[in-house]
Image: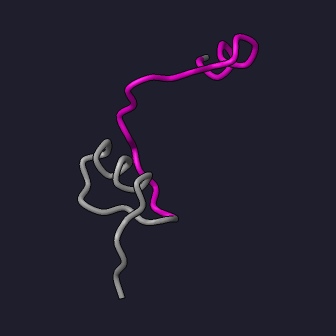
């Protein structure tokens, strides 16, 4: 049985050019904005 998607799943599906996503899927989503901590962000970017 297939259920509808949550609002978060709809947003993620839209940003990774899919019609449907579900919990457990691995996706690559285009993001609009990224927020980062000034201490850990430089390490993550490297």
Q: Is residue 30 above or below residue 24?
A: above
- Quadrant for the C terminus, please: top right
| Residue 44 inside the magenta-drawn segment | yes
Question: Is 41 on the left-hand or right-hand side of 28?
Answer: right
Identity of the residue drawn at 26% across and 54% down: 18
Residue ranking furthest to the bottom: 1
Magenta span main SS: loop
- Quadrant for the N terminus, please: bottom left
Segment colored magenta: 24-45
Residue 10: where, in percent of width, then height? 34, 54
| Residue 32 inside the magenta-drawn segment | yes
Identity of the residue drawn at 52% across and 64% down: 24
Q: Is residue 39 above or below residue 1?
A: above
The quarter of the picture where residue 3 lies is bottom left
Identity of the residue drawn at 31% across and 42% down: 15
Question: Is 39 on the left-hand or right-hand side of 22?
Answer: right
Residue 40: where, in percent of width, then height? 73, 19
Residue 25: where, in percent of width, then height? 45, 61
Residue 45: where, in percent of width, then height? 59, 18
């Amino acid at each position: 049985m297939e259920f509808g998607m949550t609002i978060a799943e709809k947003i993620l599906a839209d940003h990774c050019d899919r019609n449907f996503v579900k919990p457990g899927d691995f996706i690559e989503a285009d993001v609009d904005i990224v927020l980062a901590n000034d201490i850990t962000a430089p390490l993550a970017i490297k």
